[in-house]
Image: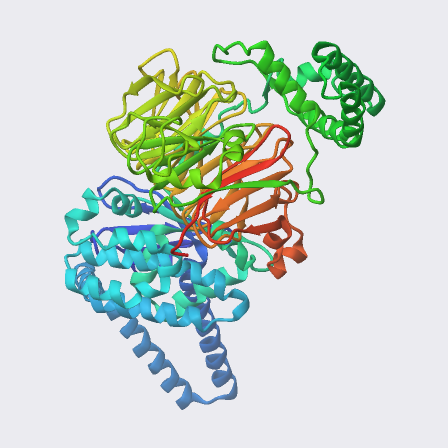
């Protein structure tokens, strides 16, 4: 029931009347005692409004009064009949007189004018809106919550944060500015760990006008919060609100919290990350968007299909025979003095050792790919060069199958002597090239093969200025990297093309530059964004790429055009990261507004809105079959989403700082996450997408079951991750002396 409405009853069947102190209009409740909801409509001449409220809050008042009145009447009648039957005439007369006096008093109370009653209600409502009532109401709710049973406390604590922020904003809206700041300072420590970013934003709310001008505060005022809670915890909260008669707390909870009540035991403490989520006023529209059909499968005639049709899954003996033929061809071509006759058998022997694992890996990959539906491309796809296609097919044939018992090998590239100037890093698909974007507007690319041949001393020339890789460093040796210069601001993102022949970079100068790794030159400068570009990424087929910017838009580009093909607008804050779908028909974007959107590239329409994160989304990753999307946020939480319906499958909790990079293994069984806490974690995707068992949910061990291994570095935050086509995991980061 609405908190600001004071109740009075007229026994007219199942209808209860009450007055609203804010409008002085009479309202009517029609109550169905065996239902869970109650409808409300207005009896005034104003526009009729219909809302739904929990019937528990109303039935207790109405039903109790009706039953108590009936019981008193039955009891009085029984006493009167007893006195009359026993002949106690004098006592009977006294009893009748008392009943008449009681009825007269009730009649006098009932004859009170509605105007007087309204004045009393308005006076009461005004006295309850003073700042002290907000402070006392929240303080009592907080004390009750912390003193509740351990089993239900973590669920009840979820209610405190939304009540806290709305108490603060209500005080600001009523111009009690000093009292609002005092209230904010008194209780902010309770929420500092989980919501520090939000609290910093709310610190800037200093006047009622800020509630409308600041998008974050305005969205909170117009939104509801979804809170998952078990039935018993919900009943405990209702009993507390009924007992204390806290009108203000009840009003805030009814107005801004939507309880998702579930039967059975309370949820696990580890599920807190998804138990509380902000629901915007347009949630109904978001639900409609998520009902749109989306084709998440692989492209028709993919390389995996070609490999299957061409009989790529050969037996070990067939692979050995093929390798022997290759060895003979090499011998006939080279005929060198380096012992070609010995090279053939050695090559065959090495291939024989890995033949079994490679065959299983390719077979598992094709079986996985066969389960995914096939879709037609909506974009004009570029032609893959023959030599590149053959190289990819060779990698697919020799791919290692990974699982929760077969973890990948990891190659970690560490940047040293960066002096906190490294903003981003990128690794090519085969791991042969590593790029770094720096605050001095430079982009540097290392060739791993050349790096291995050069002495260690040459790597120390990283901070020296120069034009390209043949420029001499201060020590007189060649530098180990190629220097790309062209941006006029810090470089925030870099992305290699699938074949490694091109490199994209984005900068705070609001431009995107395309570089040729073959000619070591800038080819195109793309201009379109008005503010810094935080992220840029090539599509899985090359040629097309996407960018994310501070101007709250994402844009789709092609290499042969200097203007964007699509502008994707809809986020309420910065678009921080982009991720292509594997079939190139869709693009996912993560934003500082704590939401993820998926767009149709051909039409520019929003197809999915993923809501659940508590902080800015920093990175995204798409599963190889296109079914699942992984996202990492600033609080260190990884979430797995089902693209087909837009729902969160599970949160993966374990990191203690920002998630900067995510990568799926090539067959999709593992997910790697890199964080600012200087660790790489491996997660079991197959376990993560399954619902947790009841015993795991009770014990809170579900997340530990999904985490396979934690790989710590000495003191290197992980900037980027990538699985090669053969399932070798590459990682990169800058050595930090501050950790």
Residue depicted at 54% across the width and 31% down the height:
431
User: How far from the left and from the top, in percent, is residue 724?
Assistant: 59, 31
Task: State the residue lying farthest toward the right.
Answer: 317
Residue depicted at 55% across the width and 67% down the height:
151
The one of 39 and 90 positioned closer to us in this rendering: 39
Position of 530 with respect to 731 (left or right) is: left
The one of 516 and 674 positioned closer to us in this rendering: 516
Vertical arrangement, residue 160 with respect to residue 345, above or below:
below
On the question of residue 718 being in view, the answer is yes
Quarter of the image containing the N terminus?
bottom left
The one of 394 and 191 positioned closer to us in this rendering: 394
User: How far from the left and from the top, in percent, is residue 348?
Assistant: 79, 24
Residue depicted at 17% across the width and 59% down the height:
115
Position of 308 with respect to 78 (left or right) is: right
Which quadrant of the structure image shows residue 76? bottom left
User: How far from the left and from the top, in percent, is residue 395?
Assistant: 65, 24
Which quadrant of the structure image shows residue 249? bottom left
């Amino acid at each position: 029931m609405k908190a600001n409405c004071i109740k009075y009853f007229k026994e007219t069947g199942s209808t209860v009347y009450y007055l609203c102190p804010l409008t002085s209009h009479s309202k009517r409740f029609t109550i169905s005692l065996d239902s869970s909801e109650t409808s409300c409509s207005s009896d005034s001449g104003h526009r009729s409004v219909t809302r739904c409220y929990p019937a528990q809050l109303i039935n207790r008042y109405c039903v109790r009064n009706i039953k108590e009145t009936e019981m008193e009447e039955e009891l009085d009648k029984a006493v009167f009949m007893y006195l009359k039957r026993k002949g106690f005439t004098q006592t009977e007369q006294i009893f009748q007189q008392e009943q008449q006096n009681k009825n007269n008093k009730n009649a006098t109370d009932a004859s009170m004018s509605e105007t007087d009653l309204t004045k009393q209600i308005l006076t009461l409502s005004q006295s309850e809106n003073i700042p002290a009532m907000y402070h006392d109401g929240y303080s009592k709710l907080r004390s009750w919550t912390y003193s509740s049973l351990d089993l239900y406390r973590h669920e009840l604590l979820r209610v405190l944060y939304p009540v806290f922020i709305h108490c603060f904003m209500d005080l600001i809206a009523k111009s009690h500015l000093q009292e609002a700041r005092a209230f904010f300072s008194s209780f902010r420590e309770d929420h500092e760990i989980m919501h520090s970013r939000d609290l910093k934003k709310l610190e800037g709310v200093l006047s009622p006008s800020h509630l409308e001008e600041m998008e974050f505060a305005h969205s909170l005022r117009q939104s509801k919060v979804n809170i998952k809670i078990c039935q018993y915890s919900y009943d405990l909260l209702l009993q507390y609100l009924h007992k204390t008669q806290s009108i203000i707390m009840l009003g805030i909870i009814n107005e801004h919290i939507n309880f998702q009540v579930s039967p059975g035991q309370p949820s696990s403490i580890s599920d807190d990350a998804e138990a509380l989520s902000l629901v915007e006023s347009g949630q109904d529209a978001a639900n409609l968007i998520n009902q749109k059909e989306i084709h998440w499968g692989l492209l028709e005639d993919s390389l995996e299909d070609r490999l299957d049709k061409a009989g790529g899954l050969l037996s070990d003996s067939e692979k050995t025979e093929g390798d022997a033929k290759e060895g003979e061809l090499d011998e006939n071509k080279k005929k060198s003095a380096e012992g070609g006759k010995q090279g053939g058998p050695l090559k065959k022997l090495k291939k024989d050792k890995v033949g079994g694992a490679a065959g299983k890996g390719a077979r598992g990959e094709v079986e996985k790919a066969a389960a995914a539906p096939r879709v037609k491309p909506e974009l004009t796809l570029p032609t893959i060069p023959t030599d590149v296609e053959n190289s990819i097919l060779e990698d697919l044939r020799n791919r290692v199958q990974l699982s929760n018992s077969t973890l990948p090998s990891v190659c970690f590239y560490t940047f040293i002597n960066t002096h906190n100037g490294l903003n981003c890093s990128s690794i090519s698909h085969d791991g042969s090239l590593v790029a770094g974007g720096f605050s001095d507007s430079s982009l540097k690319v290392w060739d791993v093969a050349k790096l291995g041949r050069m002495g260690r001393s040459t790597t120390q020339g990283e901070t020296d200025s120069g034009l390209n890789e043949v420029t001499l460093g201060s020590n007189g040796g060649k530098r180990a990297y190629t220097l790309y210069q062209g941006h006029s601001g810090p470089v925030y993102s870099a992305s290699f093309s699938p074949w490694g022949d091109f490199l994209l970079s984005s900068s705070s100068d609001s431009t995107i530059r395309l570089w040729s790794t073959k000619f070591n030159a800038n080819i195109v400068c793309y201009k379109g964004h008005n503010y810094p570009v935080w992220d840029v990424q090539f599509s899985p087929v090359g040629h097309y790429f996407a960018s994310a910017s501070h101007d709250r838009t994402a844009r789709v580009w092609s290499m042969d055009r200097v203007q964007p093909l699509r502008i994707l607008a809809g986020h309420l804050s910065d678009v921080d990261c982009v991720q292509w779908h594997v079939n190139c028909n869709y693009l996912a974007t993560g934003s500082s507004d704590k939401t993820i959107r998926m767009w149709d590239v051909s039409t520019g329409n929003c197809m999915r809105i993923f809501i659940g994160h508590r902080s800015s989304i920093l990175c995204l990753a798409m599963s190889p079959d296109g079914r699942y999307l992984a996202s990492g946020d600033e609080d260190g939480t990884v979430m797995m989403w089902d693209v087909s319906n837009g729902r969160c499958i599970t949160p993966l909790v374990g990191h203690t700082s920002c998630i900067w990079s995510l990568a799926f293994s090539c067959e999709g069984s593992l997910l790697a996450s890199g964080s600012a806490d200087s660790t790489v974690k491996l997660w079991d995707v197959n376990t993560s997408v399954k619902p947790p068992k009841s015993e795991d949910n009770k014990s809170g061990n579900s997340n530990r079951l999904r985490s396979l291994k934690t790989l710590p570095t000495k003191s290197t935050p992980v900037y980027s991750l990538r699985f090669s086509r053969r399932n070798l995991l590459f990682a990169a980061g800058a050595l930090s002396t501050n950790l």
